Image (spheres, rainbow, N blue to C red):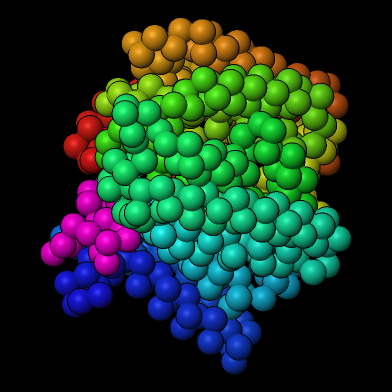
Amino acid sequence: MNGLELIALTPVLILVLGGTALLMAGAWYRQPDPLLAGGISVALAAGLSALLLTPPVQEIAGLFSSTPYARFFTLFWSLSAALMLVISVRYVKERSLPAGEYVSLVLFATAGMALLSSATSLIGIFLGLEAFTLAFYILIACNRHCDLSAEAGLKYLVMGAVATGFMAFGIALIYACSGSFHLPEALQGLAAAGALRPWGLLGWGMLLVAIGFKISLVPFHLWTPDVYQGAPTPVVSLLATGSKGAVAAALIGLFASGPSGWTDMTSLLWLLSALTMLVGALCALPQTNIKRLLAYSSVVHMGTLLIGLLCQTSDGLAASVFYVTVYCIASLGSFAIITSMADGTSEPTDLEQWRGLGYRHPVRCGVLTVLLLSLAGMPPTAGFMAKFAIFHASIQADFIGLALVGILASLISFAFYLKVIMVMFMTDETAPACHPGTTLEHSVLAICTGAVLLFGLFPGLLFDLIGSILP
């Protein structure tokens, strides 16, 4: 790797070196406020460098790209990490979590997300994926005073190890078949007589299993509700958005770079998408824990996102990028509200604890209502435009049946989202007061809500940007 490539890698280097410095500082200095402020500053600096720095080369070591598409997601994940650390300030102090380790792991995970989103090689995909997965193994179990956190960490570790094995085996088969790790050459080398070679098809199948674990496709989703329930809520906000969004960004880049090796697997992907949407929506209906409900909600969204990828058209890919961005904003804001309601010993996760809470905390419950309606796809929020773009692209690509399944799953989703809203507002009971939240936490809620409404009312702002950065 030469100097020009290092310059192009500056945002990731800022995250990694900043995280290392804060990890070392945390070993000697235990006050959490400066460490958390340092982590927020490092994340913002990485995002600023991705926005302002023009990379001198377009590819780094044959593994990662520094195109506008890669820089967009580097900026987005850096801002997401900064917002996640902002809502973690009080949470970390009240639960006596190790601030140095916590902040550094968040920055390392963000660096992995940025690398995965920009990967141009199978090795790059593997390195980026494992970089943030290893950080999340520890972050999920970092609350040593909570048994559920340890259980969630163990489940994520076991499932992650299984997914890593499938991915490594799949990459080995694709390399054996194509003779290259670089994605364009590997994709070309897999085809013979207009169809995938058998070993190449098996390799893509192995990769699909690994990706299914990472983004919670049915039937690989069973870890999701347990991990969401047990992990610290700020960690879940990044796990639900950045980790899944980074995998989706890598897939979008893969499909945009040329003909995909998954063309021969269209029928299987169609079935996976339909099952993921329907099973996720039906499993969310009986949930009484809001974190588990949002976990199954994320399953539905990943199935919907797969529709856009299946289209393999420019409209479908643009809709997928829009969908990932909007979903991550709304989901991050939803978990930020739960975090802001938590005190030093507990957090309101059971729906009974939210009964009548809209009268105690009308502003935050109103914000949660807007974000949940965006996740459901209600106009004029950005979630409506995201789903409309996905279904429109699927109809244009002749996936009409899958679009109808997606619309049905969206209608079912309204039931469990509205259940939360009804519990908060449509009752005569008045819930006990929760923590009033801090100014920092309220600022994160304002940013997420403003973005959801802005992109819902003016979706062209984001669509125009996406059209200019897609590979």
Magenta span has 102? no
Magenta span has 61? yes
Q: Which residues are magenta?
A: 55-73
Horizontally, is 59 left or right of 102 in the view? Answer: left
- Res. 394 in view: yes
- Residue 297 in picture, x, y percent from top left: 64, 31
Q: Residue at x 58, y 21 (%)?
A: 271
Horizontally, is 181 left or right of 445 in the view? Answer: left
Tell me the quarter of the picture where residue 409 sits: top right
- Residue 321 in picture, x, y percent from top left: 37, 35
126 up-or-down from 321: above or below: below
Q: Residue at x 27, y 67 (%)?
A: 61
Viewport quadrant of the C terminus: top left
Q: Nearer the viewer, residue 405 or 90?
A: 405
Furthest residue in direction left, as rendered: 56
- Residue 376 in picture, x, y percent from top left: 57, 22
- Res. 308 in view: no
Viewport quadrant of the N terminus: bottom left
Q: Residue at x 69, y 33 (%)?
A: 219
